[in-house]
Image: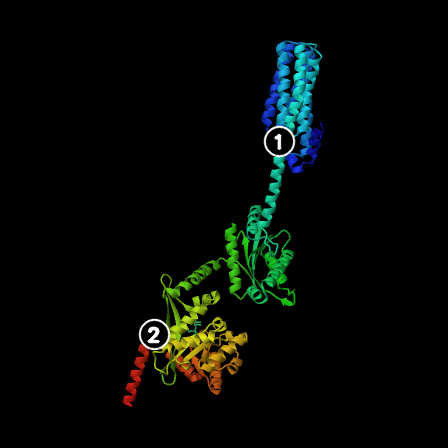
Amino acid sequence: MRALLRVLLSTNAVDDRAKALLVDSLYAQPLSLAIGGVCGILTSLTAAVESHQPPIAWVALALSMIALVRIALALLLPRIGGDARRLELFYEAGAFSYSFLVGLIAALAISLNVNPAVITLMVGNAIAYGVGIAARNAGRPAIAIGQLFLALVPVIGAAARQHDLAYTFLALTLALVLPAMMAISLQTFRVLRTSIVAAETSALLADKMQILARTDVVTGLLNRAGLNHHLVERLLAVKDGDKLALFWLDLDKFKEVNDTLGHQVGDRLLAEVATRLRQQAPPGATVARFGGDEFIVACEAEDRHQVELIAQDMLEAIARPTRIDDDRLEIGTSMGIAILPEDGEDLDTLMQSADLALYHAKVNGRNQVSFFDPSMTRNLVRRKEIEAELRLALQRDELSIYFQPIVDLATGNIRGFEALVRWFHPEKGELRPDEFIPVAEESGAIITLGNWITAQAAKAAAQWPDHVTLAVNLSPLQIRAPGAALGILNALREARLPPSRLELEITETVLLDHSQTTDTFMADLGAAGVRFALDDFGTGYSSLSYLNKYPFGKIKVDRSFVSGVNVGKTSDAIIRAVSGMGTTLGMEIVAEGLETIEQVHAVRQAGCTLGQGYYFSRPVPDHLAAILLAQESERLDAHRLAG
Ligand code: C2E
Ligand code: CA
Ligand code: CA
């Protein structure tokens, strides 16, 4: 009995979820309840008609009405829903009164000693119902056992009072059925409850694991998997006419922090950025770390203007200086933004658009926001292709060096050649260096490519007469690479080209950041005899201060001053000023892009000493360069002989 009490009471201890599930089980099969109800109605009405006893008829009527109400409730309630306690009360009220009436009608049949067939029908009905229900409702043992008792006790009572041996044994048998069925109900209930609690526990555990699997350890934000999950849900929730903004952030120069201050500091910086993003992002936004130093934020927005404001706020929040230990860190962010639905209607497209926009923000100088624009796709696809194919181009022998003569404007003799790289792509045709050099610079491939160009060009130049120089273009990145100067000197040694015959063309941008590396690079090579030319003069800052500070032997005036749209009095005046200064400083002035004899005359008048351009020759392969030199030497020989 105590065990029974404990179990009955302990049903309260089953947690609410399990309890709700158990209550649900009461209504789980409305069909079985309906069939039971219909059987109850038919049997009790049969008993009423067959027995001609008004008490039985009244009870049959009450039983039928309750059965009908219960069938209706069983079918409707789960659909209407409601809290577990209320559903249970409804069920209890119906179940108890129904069970009691089933028992009562059987007891009446015995007491009133009606037609034996009716007694058999009603007693059979009460036993079947009581036993059946004790099994069916084991999920709520208090109800099950209550129903069992209510259905059988009246029958036991009526049978016991008949002073008939058969009835006495019926009463006894049924009295034994009670504890037996009770034990079965409780056992079923225990098994049921244990398995439900176990299932609940493992579901909770699974939830916890899932949260862990979707969280980034370093920042506590969602990780890539979590982001995916959230975004899918967000996208499903977006209504027609709503906008969803996707911000893709990439910290600028985070790698440098990691490399110089260590991963621990890097991790703490990431965590700090995460905190700021979480605070700054609009409430309810999805904030995730996409991996490395990339973050993604997604939120609803009214219009583009609002998106812009959110982006600006986030950018500024990250830009505020951070102090980690003794280091004061400041970090910039590049951000790409795509908006649903205009920039992509599904997640993949939206992410792609934001990625493209981010790429543009980075290419355009970092620390800025860039909105997606459909034109980005074409350029970028080509860029990406080039980046991938450039790696193979060297191995496949698709690159070659062309040479364009630099001519002495006074004598017309070739003084040197500028090496210009060419890429003959098997499908895309000839690619311009302007298109692939920037890609190579960005991917870092320029170091390998640049070394190869210098080595190849030096080999060709070693075949030329001693007085002919070689000019090679250098990218800023090449100069900053460790061991850059040594690499160039090695290439010269291998090609057996004296350093004094090499001239490196560099642009002002190299000198802008006043780095020690650049100074050392120029000093080391200068000491070995290599000379320098300042390329594309007039296109950048054109600060004359560099000319004093660095040992340039030449200034190359950009072709926009010679043949561009801006050619006129001002450009002429600039060329004159530069030439004047060149003469005083002992530098030569080269005019680039000479296409006509008029231009040649004009720049010579303005004081340029050297010229380069299609007027003299287009860039040509090395064997044609050798032929140009041979022709010139023949011409000079003939001239000398004639003179
Ligand atoms: P740049 O150093 O200013 O090279 C001169 C460019 O002007 C070359 O274009 C050349 O073909 C072109 N050019 C020469 N004469 C004329 C002319 O009369 N009219 C016109 N319209 N153009 C003329 P290219 O070969 O397409 O090279 C473009 C740029 O790519 C170069 O400009 C240089 O900055 C870069 N580049 C080329 N080769 C290399 C290289 O080997 N390494 C590096 N780092 N950059 C290179
Ligand atoms: Ca050049
Ligand atoms: Ca140039």
Horizontal and vertical percent for residue 174?
A: 66, 18
Residue at screen point 63% across, 61% down: 317
- Does residue 536 appear left or right of residue 95 in this picture? left
- Frontmost of labels 1 and 2 is 1
| 627 left or right of 598 in image | left
Q: Which residue is mark 2?
A: 622
Label 2's element? helix
What label does residue 25 carry, if any? 1
Outermost residue, bottom direction? 643
Q: Where in the figure is residue 46, as x and y percent of width and height? A: 62, 13
The quadrant in which residue 490 appears is bottom left
Of 586 and 265, nearer the camera is: 265
Mark 1 and mark 2: Cα distance apart in space: 89 Å
Amino acid type at mark 2:
Asp
Query: Which one is in front, 540 or 526?
Result: 526
Image quarter in which the N terminus is found = top right
Judged from the image, the quadrant occupied by ligand 1 is bottom left
